[in-house]
Amino acid sequence: MNTKLEGKVALVTGGTSGIGLASAQEFAAQGARVFVTGRRQQELDAAVEAIGHGAAGIRGDVAKLDDLDRVYAEIREQAGHLDILFANAGGGDMKPLGEIDEEHFDRIFGSNVRGLVFTVQKALPLLREDSSVILTGSTVQDTGTASFSIYSASKAAVRNLARSWALDLAPRRIRVNVLSPGPVLTPGLTGLAPAGQEEGLLAYLATQVPIGRLGKPEEIAKVAAFLASSDSSFMNGSAVYADGGAAQV
Ligand SMILES: NC(=O)c1ccc[n+]([C@@H]2O[C@H](COP(=O)([O-])OP(=O)(O)OC[C@H]3O[C@@H](n4cnc5c(N)ncnc54)[C@H](OP(=O)(O)O)[C@@H]3O)[C@@H](O)[C@H]2O)c1
């Protein structure tokens, strides 16, 4: 049994579905005490049950600073500190230039950038020395994708934040890395397709991956656990791609 995260306290934002849920399960299986967040109570309750190992769910929207304060107050009360922060909550949808409106921009940047910034900043008082902070990027942080500019730009921002934060947090020996998945079969990915066109989108995306298929959330979770553990102790400010080669060729 792998117990590399034994004794660690972890928060996974957006830990109720897809990549976040699989990572929370992997962290817990490796011995961590896990907190997860998400906005929907029913999904949160189901995730806590699926994760097991004494995991706890705290409802919260990363785009709302009051929610973040409440999440961290609860973690402080229940666990006292954090060793692992996986700032993963986020998502996006597609709109071509010409159709981008304020709602689209504010919603995507509100969660993926503003929400992630304050998720990390507000965690600082709880993070111990030698903690690991993981930010969910995406292969689109480096590439262009038609009708996906706002989401892609939000992930480019995430990738760059890690570079400066590695410096800001150096005095406390807190490492910050970006985990950049390619297309992974999750509700978030399927939700990009118009109703009825899900299978077509997923089949097309699989053709864009040299490995010839979409990723599974568990495959991203293994990389998240590596970044969370001391196995990655000399990695800092990096982007780690788990993409079947999609953005590497
Ligand atoms: N799947 C992919 O192909 C892929 C590829 C690259 C990067 N990513 C990134 O991976 C991360 C997870 O995506 P996923 O594919 O696993 O999607 P998912 O299955 O839709 O899961 C998203 C999770 O984030 C939560 N969430 C979303 N917005 C939130 C907010 N404002 N505050 C708190 N929680 C929020 C969701 O719960 P609630 O809706 O209940 O809040 C859910 O738990 C995202 O950052 C996404 O951009 C995904």
Image: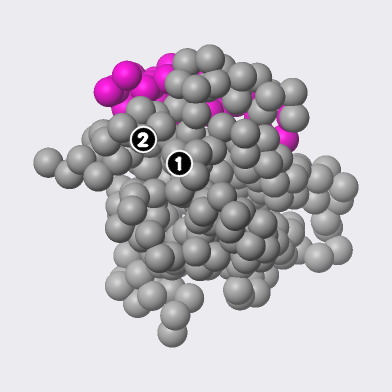
To which quarter of the image does residue 118 belong?
A: top right
Looking at the image, the residue that sits furthest to the bottom is: 249
> With respect to residue 162, does 188 lie above or below?
above
Q: Are marks 2 and 1 in contact (CB under 8 Å)?
A: yes
Magenta stretch in the rendered image = 36-64
Would the CB of label 1 be found within 8 Å of ligand 1? no
Looking at the image, the residue that sits furthest to the left is: 1
Residue corresponding to mark 2: 8
Frontmost residue, 133 versus 64: 133
The CA distance from mark 2 to mark 1 is: 7 Å
Q: Residue at x 45, y 21 (%)?
A: 79
Q: Does the magenta-highlighted stretch encompass residue 113? A: no
Residue 244 drawn at (x, y percent): 35, 70
> With respect to residue 158, does 246 lie above or below?
below
The quadrant of the rendering that contains the N terminus is top left
Frontmost residue, 207 versus 185: 185
Q: Does the magenta-highlighted stretch encompass residue 62? A: yes
Q: Amino acid at mark 1?
A: Ile
Residue 124 drawn at (x, y percent): 62, 39
Residue 84 circle label: 1
Helix, strand or loop under label 2? loop
Q: Residue at x 31, y 71 (%)?
A: 212
Would the CB of label 2 be found within 8 Å of ligand 1? no
Residue 139 drawn at (x, y percent): 53, 67
